[in-house]
Image (spheres, rainbow, N blue to C red):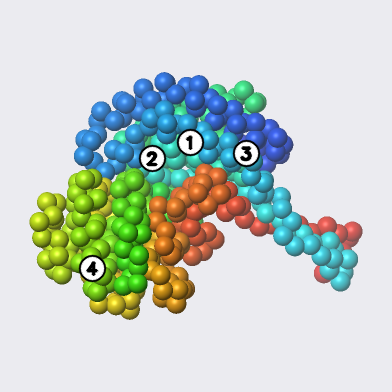
Amino acid sequence: MQSIQHKIKQTHSASILLQQAKASVINSIIKTFADELMNNAAFIIKANKKDLVKMEQSNPLYDRLQLTPERLNSIASSLKKVTKLADPSGKILDEKKLPNDIHLLKITTPLGVVAAIFESRPNVVADIAALCLKSRNACVLKGSRDADNTNQAIVKVIHGVLEKHQLPKELVLLLPPQREIVSELFTATKYIDVIIPRGSNSLIQFVRKNSLVPVIETGAGVCHVYVHKNADVQMAVDIVVNAKTTRPSVCNAMDTAIVDESIAKQFLQSLMESFQQKQVIIYADKKAYNLLTGYPYLYKAGKEDFYREFLSLTCAVKIVANESEALEHIAEHSTKHSEAIVTNNKKTAERFLSSVDAAAVYHNASTRFTDGEEFGLGAEVGIATQKLHARGPFALEKLVTEKWVLRGNGQIR
């Protein structure tokens, strides 16, 4: 296989040109990109179907891979929202005159070249390309074989838009899908400033362990909804059903429902009808299994099931004696993505919100809201579950770093 170093070097060179582009030009590029996604919808969906036929529909990644006119329209809509956001680069964070009369500024500046490795999510191509352009970063994209036809189609559209605006297409580089090139990507420290993995926990851990380029970690989501003894049962049912079933293949979907023992029978009986209609598979602990007798899609949970990100219409159910036990379970099994409590007890809710270690914590709301667009941030690169630089929806505002600028008139030290 040919080396990709020369391509990455070209993208690095192109990133310098982007920093000189006018904000109006960048916004025009992103808006045109959004329009061209819709104008080329038939072309993109045809490419997407080539990828879909290679994957079993039962595969949890199938839904993530699939594009429809409605989903393309949603992507285009989120890109247009990005154009309305403030340019995150060039902002003055601090300004002062030093005693020696040097004028000092601290400003935001682009990261430079942002690389992303992702699985079966072609919308990531559009989102990251737009966010990087808006923040004046070039991007290097490494998708999986599963989505390669779709990824190529979307990148072809953005390349056409860049050339129309007289900017180099190398600003958005799509690498071949073969795994063999990853080692080159991981060692391109001279040309790539940061790598962002987006996908399964195994992918994320692989990138963390092997990359010499700094990694910003977006996390797999093992998300919990804790139904406290003081919960409104119908509200709890609605939240759990929404968190599990609206789009089960995404990282903010619920994986485990935790229920206080004193309310478990009432809650689970109310939940069964809604779950049965949607054919949700339940892995239940011993107490929950006994209460769910007669449910047609019921299995006994093993210890490993409470660590699983199911990405499908499957979840685990755990019954606890009290809130302390619930908090202990979450602390042990959470991937620090999104955690929710349903309760009418404000004191308990505040304890949960302050003590649970996660990027997003909820009181009486579904975990499905952990999303850059829902938070008013436009599109997102992913949901960061680490604590350095970015946490939660990793969007436009975090695609910059800082630079100190000093202006003098001959001062020496």
Asked if the residues shown at circle 3 and circle 4 are in contact, with their CB atoms under 8 angstroms apart, the answer is: no
Residue 246 in sight in this render: yes
Q: Is residue 373 above or below residue 219?
A: above
Considering the numbered disc 3 on the image, is that residue within a helix, a strand or a loop? helix
Q: CA distance from mark 2 to mark 4?
A: 37 Å
Image position of 155 (left or right of 295): right
Check disc 3 and report the residue beneath it. 83
Name the amino acid type tagged 3.
Answer: Thr
What is the secondary structure assignment of the residue under circle 2? loop
First of labels 1, 2 by sequence position: 1
Q: Which residue is mark 4?
A: 264
Marks 1,2: beta carbons within 8 A: no
| Image disc number at residue 121 | 2
Q: Quadrant of the N terminus?
A: top left
**Which residue appears at 30% of the width and 48% of the height?**
245
Q: Residues within 10 Å of mark 4 (few under 14, many from 20)?
A: many
x%, y% of residue 153?
43, 26
Task: Look at the picture and state if 390 lies above or below 10.
Answer: below
Q: Secondary structure at mark 1?
A: helix
